[in-house]
Image: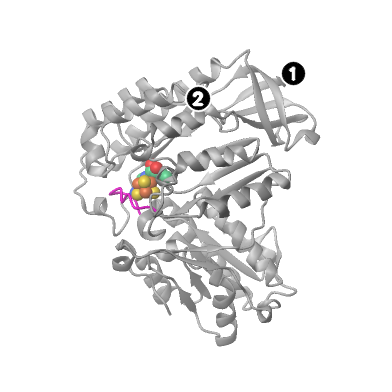
């Protein structure tokens, strides 16, 4: 058993990042023959992309995908730790799986992702969830064949979670669900240690993928007809900071733009590392989408300081104003309410900031204390009712601006990458360059293509349009 350790996970040394190539021995390749797997993914795009790797690994072992967990021989939960409710969802699902396992003794159940990196979760699994067959962490996805084989041959619960700072594994297979939009990891981990956030503990040290590995992956996607890549990382603006040579997100965006891929997105950005050079490159290339996700978290400099965000409200606004000079740009954000010691007047500053920035989209949350993070130890006197009230007021405010911004689009012609069939008959939907959802009448043959659409109507979370 290799259990997670927060003491180890918190460490950041100067040690160089280990690079490994994915390899599995041919003797593993029949573990899953005739068996089906089902993966339930919680959380962010990083987890979704990890699941694409996990699916491909399982298929190399002979498993085939099942669309329902009722029919599966192996069920794997790829979990998220970011807030309490993500935890609750995964534990709720475990309750259902326990019942299924009582009915079918051969069912294999595994847990991976961020919760697997949490000491308290894994302790609970070893004590109260002995029936879970195996657990592996975010640093050792490539070890899944070994973990599974060990579990099957020994019959014992197998737990293998690394808490070292993290490695980079190249050459893992990937089963992409989408054939025109792809996620590409450019970096892993985070060194920002915002005081509320569990990610630096669950995902390890900030480490950037080699530029050539990224560019080769993008070129391969272009050759295979992909239209859009989203460059992924917990804090993509810090890309390259761990290199011994000078190469950063500005350089990478430019090189990816030159591959000719139709659309480039990137997320998530931390305001601290956003440079003027990056803004210039986004302006320069039409295929870098003018849509920036720039989490602010709070409009109060006092709370930002307690959050360890390393910028003040004024500094955020300065950066926001520079970004708004990118033609036709849309800006979205994340906001936390109810952080310990947030007063009514701190919250009002958040509302004022929203009034100033008029975000195109915002993800809003109530602070959720995460065991092991500094903010979880802060005294918190605000009641849950008050926090819910703040969230409600905030949501009304951000929604007002979503609608206002969307209304400004009416009559404009926009480029849309068609994504799928809408619930309404005869309608399809896609996303504009600024990442707005738009529904319009059209043939499903257009899915995966970029078309021109005129915006005819605006709602809070979507637009309507017609092909033109
Ligand atoms: N409580 C509430 N929200 C959180 N986030 C991260 N950690 C927490 C937490 N402990 C939010 C932040 C971040 C987004 C991905 O999730 O707003 O930007
Ligand atoms: Fe978490 Fe993002 Fe802060 Fe990193 S930058 S600690 S991922 S909120």
The secondary structure that most of the magenta stretch takes on is loop
Q: Nearer the viewer, residue 12 or 374?
A: 12
Q: Secondary structure at mark 1?
A: loop
Q: Residue at x 67, y 33 (%)?
A: 417
Above-or-below relation of 234 to 338: below
Q: Position of residue 376 (x, y in %)?
A: 26, 53
Please determine whether, in this image, residue 2 is positioned above or below residue 271: below
Magenta stretch contains residue 197: yes
Q: Is mark 1 within 8 Å of ligand 1?
A: no
The residue that label 2 is drawn on is 329
Counting from the top left corner in percent of width and height, residue 126 is at: 41, 76
Q: Secondary structure at mark 2?
A: loop
Q: Give the camera-side residue of 252 and 91.
A: 252
Q: Which mark is residue 217?
A: none
Give the left or right position of residue 321, taking residue 64 as reference. left
Q: Earlier in the sequence, mark 1 or mark 2?
A: 2
Q: Residues within 10 Å of mark 2 (few under 14, many from 20)?
A: some
State which region is magenta.
190-198
Identify the residue shown where x is 65% and y is 68%.
58
User: In front: 291, or 168?
Assistant: 168
In the rendered image, the vertical position of residue 73 relative to residue 368, given as above or below: below
Residue 223 in picture, x, y percent from top left: 72, 46
Q: Pinpoint residue 279: horizontal percent, then vertical percent.
A: 45, 30
User: Circle 1 is placed at which residue position?
Assistant: 468
Residue 347 visible within the image = no
* Left or right, 93 with reference to 218: left
In which quarter of the view is residue 100 placed?
bottom right
């Amino acid at each position: 058993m290799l259990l997670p350790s927060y003491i180890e996970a918190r460490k950041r040394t100067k040690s160089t990042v280990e690079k490994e190539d994915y390899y599995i021995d041919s003797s593993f390749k029949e573990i899953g023959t005739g068996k089906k797997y089902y993966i339930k993914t919680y959380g962010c795009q990083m987890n979704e992309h990890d699941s694409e790797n996990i699916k491909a690994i399982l298929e190399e072992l002979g498993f085939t995908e099942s669309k329902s967990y009722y029919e599966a021989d192996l069920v794997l939960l790829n979990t998220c730790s970011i807030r309490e409710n993500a935890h609750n969802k995964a534990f709720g699902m475990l309750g259902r799986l326990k019942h299924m396992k009582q009915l079918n003794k051969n069912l294999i159940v595994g847990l991976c992702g961020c919760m697997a990196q949490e000491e308290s979760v894994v302790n609970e699994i070893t004590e109260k969830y002995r029936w879970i067959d195996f657990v592996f962490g975010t640093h050792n996805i490539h070890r899944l064949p070994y973990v599974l084989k060990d579990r099957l041959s020994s019959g014992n619960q197998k737990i293998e979670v690394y808490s070292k700072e993290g490695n980079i594994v190249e050459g893992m297979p990937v089963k992409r669900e989408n054939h025109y939009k792809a996620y590409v990891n450019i970096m892993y981990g985070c060194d920002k240690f915002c005081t509320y956030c569990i990610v630096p503990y669950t995902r390890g040290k900030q480490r950037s993928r080699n530029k050539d590995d990224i560019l080769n992956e993008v070129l391969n996607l272009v050759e295979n007809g992909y239209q859009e890549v989203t460059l992924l990382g917990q804090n993509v603006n810090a890309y390259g900071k761990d290199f011994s040579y000078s190469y950063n997100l500005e350089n990478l965006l430019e090189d990816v733009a030159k591959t000719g891929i139709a659309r480039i997105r990137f997320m998530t950005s931390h305001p601290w590392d956003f440079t003027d050079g990056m803004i210039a490159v986004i302006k320069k290339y039409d295929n870098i989408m003018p849509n920036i996700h720039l989490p602010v978290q709070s409009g109060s400099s006092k709370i930002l300081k307690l959050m360890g965000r390393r910028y003040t409200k004024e500094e955020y606004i300065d950066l926001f104003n520079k970004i708004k000079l990118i033609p036709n740009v849309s800006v979205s954000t994340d906001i936390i309410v109810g952080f310990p010691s947030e007063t009514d007047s701190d919250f009002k500053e958040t509302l004022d900031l929203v009034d100033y920035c008029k975000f195109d989209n915002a993800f809003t949350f109530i602070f959720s204390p995460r065991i092991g993070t500094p903010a979880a130890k802060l005294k918190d006197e605000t009641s849950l009712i008050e926090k819910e009230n703040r969230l409600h007021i905030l949501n009304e405010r951000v929604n007002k601006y979503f609608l206002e911004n969307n209304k400004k689009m009416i009559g404009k012609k926009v480029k849309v990458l068609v994504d799928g069939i809408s619930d309404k008959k005869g309608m399809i939907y896609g996303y504009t360059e600024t990442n707005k959802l738009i529904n319009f009448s059209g043939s499903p043959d257009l899915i995966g293509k970029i078309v021109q659409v005129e915006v005819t109507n605006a709602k809070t979370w979507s637009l309507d349009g017609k092909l033109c």
